[in-house]
Image: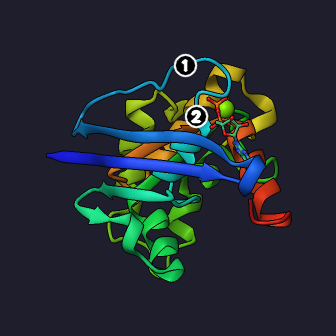
Amino acid sequence: MRIVDVSHVTKMYGHRQNRVQALNDLSFKIDEGEFVGIMGPSGAGKSTLLNIMATIDQPTSGKVVVGGQDVTAMSDAELANFRREELGFIFQDFNLLDNLTVKENIALPLTLTPKLPADFDQRIVQVSEILGLNELLNRYPSELSIGQRQRVASARAMITKPKLILRMNPQGVWIRQRQRNCCGT
Ligand SMILES: Nc1ncnc2c1ncn2[C@@H]1O[C@H](COP(=O)(O)OP(=O)(O)O)[C@@H](O)[C@H]1O
Ligand SMILES: [Mg+2]
């Protein structure tokens, strides 16, 4: 199954003399089960691409299809649902909540949906087994090693059975925040 289809994506920032072309007619595909890293020098457009695939930013032109759905043609409300249901996010600093146990951290994306899935407990067991977290479910993040925290963050990204899991770098998120608060560049 095709999971990602990026076709002829262009991204421009700024206006007039400040105009920057971050992405220039970019096309590629990712199939189910593929593990893809985006590599390139600083300023090459990695964060821009990641933000567009994460649907937190839109391309200037071109089309992005994720899991068969055209995310470049969705409303904000549709995108919010799409992100919650079809995408998993792993943040570089893990973003675990200190006052929640490992189990509660993993379950968090499910507890944010309107209705808990019928196989809630089974999913926790499954994902904990895959990532070797069974023994750690009642601990708090502060009682874990960095590697264990990373696995909890991965489990949390997998628990909703997303079509695509994105590992975000903080810089990318920061750029997006700057855009939101600032002048719409
Ligand atoms: N919000 C923004 N406003 C203006 N230019 C931006 C913005 N974000 C990124 N850019 C520019 O777009 C290009 C690609 O940036 P980016 O995607 O952050 O690259 P990378 O993540 O590969 O270092 C760079 O020239 C950068 O300066
Ligand atoms: Mg970057």
Residue visible at 59% across and 60% down in the picture: 108
Mark 1 highlights which residue?
40
Snapshot colouring = rainbow
Disc 2 under 8 Å from ligand 1? The reply is yes
Ligand 1 under 8 Å from disc 1 Cβ: yes
Instruction: Identify whether 163 is placed above or below 137.
Output: below
Asked whether, in this view, residue 39 is left or right of residue 91, the answer is: left
Write down the residue under mark 2: 45
- Residue type, mark 1 in image: Gly
Give residue 53's position: percent from left, percent from top: 46, 50
Residue farthest toward the right in the current orientation of the protein: 182
Q: Residues within 10 Å of mark 2 (few under 14, many from 20)?
A: some
Confirm whether residue 141 shows in the render: yes
Which residue is at 71% across, 22% downward? 146
Q: Which callout, 2 or 1, points at the residue further toward the start of the chain?
A: 1
Residue 184 is situated, as x and y percent measured from the top left of the image, at: 75, 65
Q: Which corner quadrant of the image does residue 116 belong to?
A: bottom left
Query: Which quadrant does ligand 1 occupy?
Result: top right
Residue depicted at 58% across the width and 58% down the height: 57
Where is residue 55? Give x, y as percent.
50, 59
